[in-house]
Image: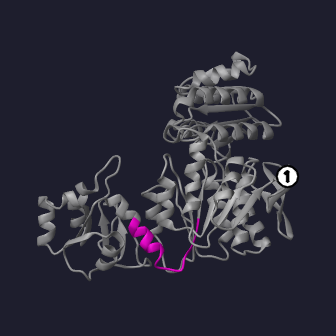
Amino acid sequence: MDNSNRIPWTTSDILEATGGVLQTGPGDYVFSGISIDSRTIGHGDFFVAIIGDAHDGHNFIAGVLKKGVRGILVGKENTGTSTFEELASGGHVVISVADTTRALGDLASYNRCRTPLSVIALTGSNGKTSTRSMLTCVTANRYETLATAGNFNNAIGLPLTLLRLEEKHDLAVLELGMNRPGEIRRLAEICRPDIGMIINVAPAHLEGLGSIEGIKRAKGELLEKLNPGGRAILNADDPNVHALAEDAPGEVLLFGISDDAAIRASRIREQGNGLSFLLETPGETAEVMLDTPGRFMISNALAAAAAGYLLEIPLPEIKAGLERFKPVSGRMHIRELSNGTRIIDDTYNANPESVKAALDTLQQIEKQGRGAAVLGDMLELGEQSAALHHEVGRHAALTGPDRLYLTGDSALDMAQGARNGGMDTKRVISGSTQKIAEDLIAWAGPQDWILVKGSRGMHMERIVQELVNTFGQR
């Protein structure tokens, strides 16, 4: 890993950041960066031995020593091993802490405070990644921006993002994810946001949060941890988010189509496979063309525009940034096959509200030809899973695709919902992803649209790949 532009770390920095104990080694050693990955670590890096779901970093210490690494952070229970004795005799820097994952977050928080960086932290049940991508497009010309990569939005991923910080960066745009209470609070403690953005609250991760009210409270943890003088950006169209404005500690900027939103969209129109709208900010307006068919993406665009407005980016630059946005792979990404079929690849993840929005989008853009919706299970919905899958099935019937393909343990619940919604049983097809792909290959033709969506664990992208492999992509 190239750490040449990263801010260096001394042993003293690491001790101050983590509150750890120096077990052995010099107190003035300088490291070029922090790493948890034994595969990519550089010889000048400091290794943090994380205990993850699948691997324990302590088991890889011998390997990183062979790469010339001179510093290790370990759990205090690992300081009595033979490996530790080898480290001590070799003059390596060894620091022990009670919890290495928490220490990783502490290192990231320390790093965040070593430069005059401004931080925008955003969370929501849907649309985090698209909003983050839009916002980085908006800020690109004016700010050197550090942004979350991929899905690095948890207690390990967020710190790794902040540990990529270089002195050139003057803005960070960070996603905060969660599936249980307290996670957002901890992530916000780490990144210390100047602007906190809550995009929406919808049924997701109900296994860990219990109810919509639980999700609302968990998202609201972000506002508790804003820096002094911090500002909140909230969705005026989402009642659960709007209600959080009452508890926000500072200035609140609302976005949406509601009359009380300061950053608004009006005159929304379909334009080919995209959308146009009038972006209204206090005292100014601009026509914006979005390169995506999903109307719900306008809410994400307004959130990004609101952040741009608070950063005092001129409206023409905000407009240009939004128009540069391209859908992220797996998130409302339109793929055109060589046979003329178009796929709406929305396979990255799913919850009830995002599936309904995707079904609405299919109905909206399927003007000629036919439409097929391919839906997999929505995971982590707890006791409400059957009812919510049934509800999505009913919504599918209302939007009227020519075919509804269902896969997963909850396919029966969705199928029953579709039938109860009036959908002809002959148009509902359940089966494995392989069976569905084979049926679609035989069915799909020019002008047809296919929506593919499901939770990450359902691997719905396999269906998309089978279609691309068979027909090729334009």
Image point (24%, 70%), residue name: 21
Q: Quadrant of residue 319?
A: bottom right
User: Does residue 233 lie above or below 3 as drawn?
Assistant: above
* Residue 416 is inside the magenta segment: no
Query: Relative to residue 398, is residue 283 drawn left or right?
Result: right
- Range covered by the magenta-colored residues: 106-120
Q: Residue furthest top?
A: 425
Q: Is residue 263 left or right of residue 230?
A: right
> Would you place residue 366 above or below residue 137 in this image?
above
Label 1 element class: strand
- Say whether residue 114 is magenta: yes
The foreground one among 130 and 207 is 207
The relative height of residue 429 versus residue 463 in the rendered view (above or below) is: above
Nearer the observer, 243 or 241: 243
| Amino acid under disc 1 | Ile
Give residue 229's quadrant in the image: bottom right
Observer-nearest residue: 162 or 192?
Answer: 192
Name the residue nearer the viewer: 18 or 378. 18
Residue 467 location, x and y as percent?
61, 37
x and y, in percent, of residue 191 in the image: 50, 66
Residue 207, percent from left and from top: 50, 37
In the image, what residue occupies the spot 62% across and 32% down?
375
Measuring from the top left, give residue 408's x and y in whole percent: 53, 27
Q: Answer above or below: position of 95 versus 177.
A: below
Let me know if residue 259 appears in the view: yes
Q: Which residue is mark 1?
A: 268
Residue at 63%, 48% in the rendered image:
126
Position of residue 21 in the picture relative to residue 310 (left or right): left
Dot 1: few (<14), some (14–19), or many (≥20) neighbours within 10 Å? some
Q: Where the N terminus falls, by quadrant?
A: bottom left
Q: State whether residue 342 appears in this view.
A: no
